Amino acid sequence: MKLHHTKHHQTYVTALNAAEESYAKAATPKERISLQAALKFNGGGHINHSLFWKNLAPAPEKGGAGGKLDGSTAFAAAVKADFGSLDNLIQKFNTATLGIQGSGWGWLGVNPTTKKLEIATTSNQDPLLTLLPVIGIDIWEHAFYLQYLNVKPDYLKAIWNVVNFDEAAKRYDAAVNSGADAAKL
């Protein structure tokens, strides 16, 4: 993950800054429109990865609380209400995320209208726009290739051991109680 953070995420930040500088200097609408793809891709890469890093915590055997869902939280109650159990959520999430063709992201988010948890996927570095993000899992090969080679199911099975459910519970509370988008927190 160190390589993922220091190289891949940094590349999105650097490219986003360059695209924003070019946008500020663009003299015509055509020039600004030509920068939209770079802004979306690199901006999404930065937003998604910023959420992703906070989504992770060391596993208990490494002294952390990763993979442990506190059953007393409103988030745990929502998981049970909307999916029946954490195991059902994980199974449905992993199935949806494995369906991504190529690269993208698996998401658990709050529907801003119904306040229910929903699973969604996005392609490439597209940010989650239809739900308020609670958990985002990077399914680009750079996220798992060094450790899991090309075996996405093994990566998705293991990632839940380091998901920071305390952070997810905070994001859920903010989304449900005030409509706050974790990408803006």
Image: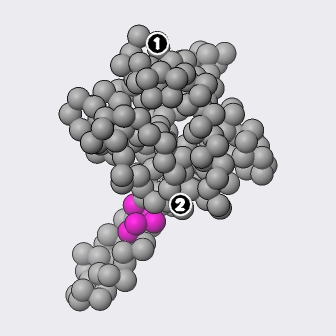
Q: Dividing the picture into quarters, in which one does residue 38 lie?
A: bottom left
Residue 63 percent across, percent down from the top left: 59, 15
Closer to the chain start, of discs 1 and 2, is: 1
Residue 146 percent across, percent down from the top left: 75, 47
For residue 71, the mark is: 1
First to last magenta residue range:
39-43
User: Which residue is rendered at x = 36% and y = 34% of the image?
Assistant: 116
User: Which residue is rendered at x = 59% and y = 46% of the image?
Assistant: 96
Residue type highlighted by circle 1: Gly
- The residue under label 2 is 123
| Magenta-colored stretch includes residue 49 | no
Please, what is the dominant secondary structure of the magenta stretch? helix
Image position of 140 (left or right of 75)? right
Residue 43 percent across, percent down from the top left: 40, 61
Image position of 174 (left or right of 70)? left
Q: Secondary structure at mark 2?
A: strand
Q: Dividing the picture into quarters, in which one does residue 155 lie?
A: top right
Q: CA distance from mark 1 to mark 2?
A: 32 Å
Badge 2, how many Cα within 10 Å: few under 14, some, many 20+?
some
